Image (cartoon, rainbow, N blue to C red):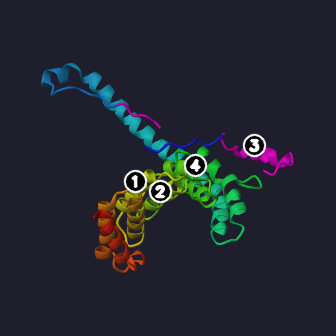
């Protein structure tokens, strides 16, 4: 498994950010399962009705409590998190097509003018969808800023079943490991990214990257398989354009 240095101290809270500005600074519930054993006789049921009703009543209270938590605590937290995320997300989007990327990515990460950054969102709203998504944004921001250790850490914290975001997060970790010259780890994540979800965009891209890195670390047969899959299954993809060249290289390397 990959090893890399952990990031530093905790990001500032919203209140601390506001105080910093005023001072002139720039900057679940766990359910317990009940095992009631094997089947019970009718006589036992009759003799223990009060006990049974108490258990049923307790289960109802737990279910209602969970539903209440979801409606009155979780949902408002989700809305609040998304509202607090708006400013940081705008900085990130602006950074993607702007020459002053690093400064905008920094604002996206750390926030500005008393507004939360992605680091704040990820920590403060860690149990929400917005908090999870903030890990993705933070990881990609760090990747663009060439802070590969933090990119790996935040992208690893992101969980998604989305057809595109999930593979891109894993592929981003692979990209970071390439820059850290940890090619075995990069290869593993590219393979994960390629297999995570099948689509015409991310699958051929990460099959290609896995193949290229595979050739560098001696996984020539696997690399050949990945290149052939691109040719047969994704002939219209960008990666398929010169794939015969890479198939030839993999075949030569395997012999």
Extreme residue toward the right, this view = 24
Q: Is residue 82 left or right of residue 211?
A: right
Residue 76, visible in the rendered structure: no
Q: Earlier in the sequence, mark 2 or mark 3?
A: 3
> Residue 174 got which mark?
2
Which tag is nearer the camera, tag 1 or tag 3?
1
Relative vertical location of residue 71 with respect to residue 197 in this rendering, above or below: above
Residue at the image point whose x is 37% and y is 65% from the top = 207
Residue appearing at x 49%, y 51% in the figure: 182
Hey, which residue is sitting farthest top in the picture? 47
Q: Earlier in the sequence, mark 4 or mark 3?
A: 3
Most common secondary structure along the magenta stretch: loop
Q: Dividing the picture into quarters, in which one does residue 190 lie?
A: bottom left
Q: Which residues are magenta?
A: 9-32
Image x and y of residue 136, in percent? 54, 56
| Badge number at residue 16 | 3
Badge 1 element:
helix
Measured as percent of width and height from the top left, residue 193 is found at 40, 59
Give SS at disc 4.
helix
Asked if marks 4 and 1 touch (Cβ < 8 Å), the reply is no
The residue that disc 1 covers is 188
**Of callouts 1 and 2, the N-terminal one:** 2
Residue on which the image places disc 4: 149
Q: Quadrant of the N terminus?
A: top left
């Amino acid at each position: 498994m990959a090893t890399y240095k952990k990031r530093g101290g905790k990001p500032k809270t919203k209140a601390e950010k506001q105080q910093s500005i005023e001072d002139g600074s720039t900057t679940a519930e766990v359910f317990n399962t009940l095992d009631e054993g094997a089947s019970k006789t009718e006589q036992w049921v009759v003799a223990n009705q009060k006990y049974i009703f108490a258990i049923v009543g307790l289960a109802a209270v737990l279910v209602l409590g969970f539903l209440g938590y979801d409606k009155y605590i979780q949902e408002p937290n989700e809305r609040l998190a998304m509202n607090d995320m708006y400013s940081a997300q705008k900085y990130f989007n602006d950074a993607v097509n702007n020459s002053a990327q690093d400064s905008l990515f920094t604002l996206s990460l750390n926030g500005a003018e008393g507004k939360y950054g992605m680091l704040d969102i990820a920590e403060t709203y860690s149990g929400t969808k917005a908090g999870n998504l903030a890990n993705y944004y933070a990881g990609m921001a760090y990747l663009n800023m060439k802070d590969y250790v933090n990119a790996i850490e935040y992208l690893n914290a992101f969980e998604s079943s989305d057809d595109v975001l999930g593979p891109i997060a894993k592929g981003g970790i692979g990209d970071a490991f390439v820059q850290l010259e940890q090619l075995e780890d990069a290869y593993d994540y590219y393979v994960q990214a390629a297999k995570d979800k099948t689509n015409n965009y991310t699958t051929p891209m990460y099959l290609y990257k896995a193949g290229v890195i595979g050739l560098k670390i001696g996984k020539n047969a696997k690399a050949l398989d990945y290149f052939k899959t691109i040719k047969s299954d994704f002939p219209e993809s960008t990666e398929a354009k010169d794939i015969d060249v890479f198939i030839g290289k993999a075949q030569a390397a395997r012999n």
